[in-house]
Image (cartoon, rainbow, N blue to C red):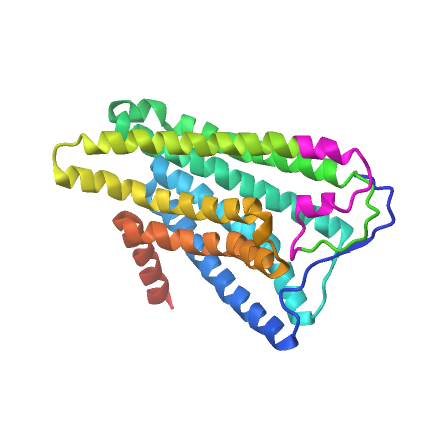
Amino acid sequence: MSNSSSIRHFLLLALAETRQLQLLHFCLLLGISLAALLGNGLIISAVACGHHLHTPMFFFLLNLALADLGSICTTVPKAMHNSLWDTSNISYTGCAAQGFFFLFFISAELSLLTIMCYDRYVSICKPLHYGTLLGSRACAHMAAAAWASAFLNALMHTANTFSLPLSHGNALGQFFCEIPKILKLSCSKSYLRELGLLAVTVCLNFGCFVFIVFSYVQIFRAVLRIPSEQGQHKAFSTCLPHLAVVSLFLSTGIFSYLKPPSMSSPSLNLALSVLYLVVPPALNPLIYSLRNQELKAEVRRLMTGCFQEH
């Protein structure tokens, strides 16, 4: 990726102006990151080790946990480093790598959440076809398609953005390398090409959103037709964790990028970005483990085994 500008590094936005607040932010990010690493790590270990959890739902949950781990490990360590050492620099290549991996994991997460919605739809609305539509090979293909499409999307946007000449300074106005912020530094009309790519991506993401909404409309209609109240409760309980995770992911992301200009301010933008990037990966394992008895039992078994060994 060649760039005709002389920029060697970018300046990221500081999380706080005073030294005391910077250290406080470092401690908060450290605590949330450790919670996310522990929670997602336990889910990955539980699903991998628990043979009775080798089902499509838990297979996609394992992939979602990997995406959550990747997203939080891409942006948060650099922000913690800058807060601890009171700096704001990130190298040009480091920024390109961070932008690529951020897009990669966020795109994969949305694709996986959409696939998990399809899993719930088939499970409740077409239970007799579940084994056919979501066999092991079909699940592997869907997961591979999610990761491959996320990789191509991230590669396309990163290569296109970092090939643009940048002449409007090197201050990003964000605590991590974000494609729209970098585009604002471009002085070339070729940035319109990247805006076109972003528009296509937004349309595809909107398509995932519409699919999720449509699927849940069908799911709720099917659940309400179940004659027994116990059956309705069981069906709802399998959907609530996924619905909560989707709502958290989409609501924070949509409000971050589509809030009214009148509400825009540097401090609010920063707070929303932290909320969007850090909170979902930390809360997702908790949401899933609270509602799923099988997963909770396997996590408890793993932790008990670890304590007994030590």
In front: 299, or 205? 205
> Whole-percent x and y of residue 68?
49, 49
Res 2 → quadrant: top right
In front: 22, or 65? 22
Residue 257 colored in magenta in the image = no
Is 220 left or right of 306, judged from the image as shown?
left
Tell me, yes or no, if residue 118 can be seen here. no
In front: 70, or 257? 257
> Whole-percent x and y of residue 251?
46, 46
Say which residue appears at 55% left-offset and 59% top-offset. 271
> Whole-percent x and y of residue 153?
62, 34
Say which residue appears at 35% left-offset and 23% top-offset. 133
In the picture shown, does residue 195 fall above or below 290? above
> Whole-percent x and y of residue 66?
49, 46
Is 188 left or right of 253, judged from the image as shown?
right
Residue 180 colored in magenta in the image = yes
Total labels drawn: 0
Q: Quadrant of the N terminus?
A: top right
Q: Quadrant of the C terminus?
A: bottom left
Going by the picture, which residue comes out furthest to the front? 262
Tell me, yes or no, if residue 88 can be seen here. yes
Is 13 left or right of 57, judged from the image as shown?
right
Going by the picture, which residue comes out furthest to the left? 228
Say which residue appears at 73% left-offset and 39% top-offset. 161
Instruction: Look at the image and give the residue range highlighted in magenta.
Output: 174-196
Say which residue appears at 77% left-offset and 51% top-offset. 92
In the picture shown, does residue 92 fall above or below 191? below
